[in-house]
Image (cartoon, helix red, strand yellow):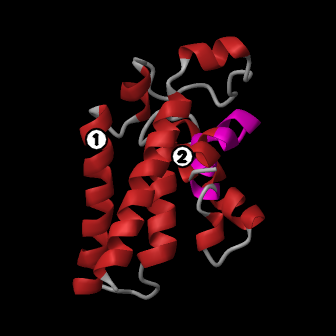
């Protein structure tokens, strides 16, 4: 199963968009899946259904941070280099979808949505592009990781 397929399958199991992407890369990260799932749980629905940054984008950023991030009070080039990676991931996602903002991706005018998620029914999946968006995020991140590995070899 590809990471794209794994991320999409995670969403169809009931994980939120952020968890779906992050968990598709769990084998690459030195963190247990339960902790990774909890860490990414707040970012579904554009950060707790606030409809801000898409959870799948937040998932990409979390994985990138765990793989390439810094762990101290960095203020110099190390921080700049990492932020450049994050901005590149955002650019690639935005190039494909026109935005990294959940409400814009879903065509919603509501900003701060109610905290109760909709039931995951077949009708829910028919009206939401989320599985494809999640798959795209996983694919973008996988390609980025592959490029980083090639540059470092």
> To which residue does mark 1 refer?
94
What residue lies at 74% left-to-right and 21% top-to-bottom? Answer: 119
Residue 136 visible to an observer of this rendering: yes
Q: Position of residue 28 (x, y in %)?
A: 59, 72
Residue 101 found in image quarter: top left
Q: Is residue 11 above or below residue 75?
A: above
Q: Is residue 91 left or right of residue 57?
A: left
Of label 1 and label 2, which has the lower sequence position? Answer: 2
Q: Quadrant of the C terminus?
A: bottom left
What residue lies at 43% left-to-right and 88% top-to-bottom? Answer: 72
Label 1: which secondary element: helix
Q: Main secondary structure of the magenta part?
A: helix
Q: Is residue 122 above or below residue 151?
A: above
Q: Is residue 149 above or below residue 74?
A: above
Q: CA distance from mark 1 to mark 2?
A: 17 Å
What residue lies at 64% left-to-right and 61% top-to-bottom? Answer: 39
| Segment tinted magenta in the rendering | 9-23
Residue 17's disc number: none
Is the Cβ of the residue at disc 1 closer than 8 Å to that at disc 2? Answer: no
Of 3 and 62, which appears nearest the observer? 3
Q: Position of residue 17 (x, y in %)?
A: 58, 41
Determine if the magenta segment contains residue 22: yes
Label 2: which secondary element: helix
Determine if the magenta segment contains residue 97: no
- In the picture as drawn, the residue positioned furthest to the top comes out as 123
Residue 76 visible to an observer of this rendering: no
Q: Position of residue 147 (x, y in %)?
A: 33, 68
> To which residue does mark 2 refer?
4
């Amino acid at each position: 199963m590809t990471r794209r397929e794994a991320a999409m399958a995670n969403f169809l199991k009931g994980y939120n968009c952020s968890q779906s992407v992050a968990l598709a890369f769990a084998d690459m990260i030195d963190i247990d899946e339960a902790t990774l799932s909890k860490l990414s749980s707040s970012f579904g629905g554009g950060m707790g259904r606030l409809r801000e940054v898409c959870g799948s984008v937040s998932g990409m950023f979390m994985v990138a941070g765990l793989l390439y991030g810094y762990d101290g009070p960095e203020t110099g080039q190390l921080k700049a280099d990492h932020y450049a990676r994050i901005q590149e991931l955002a650019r690639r996602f935005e190039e494909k979808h026109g935005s990294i903002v959940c409400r814009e991706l879903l065509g919603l005018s509501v900003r701060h949505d109610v905290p109760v998620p909709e039931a995951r029914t077949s009708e829910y999946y028919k009206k939401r592009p989320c599985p494809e968006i999640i798959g795209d995020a996983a694919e973008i991140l996988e390609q980025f990781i592959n490029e980083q590995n090639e540059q470092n070899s």
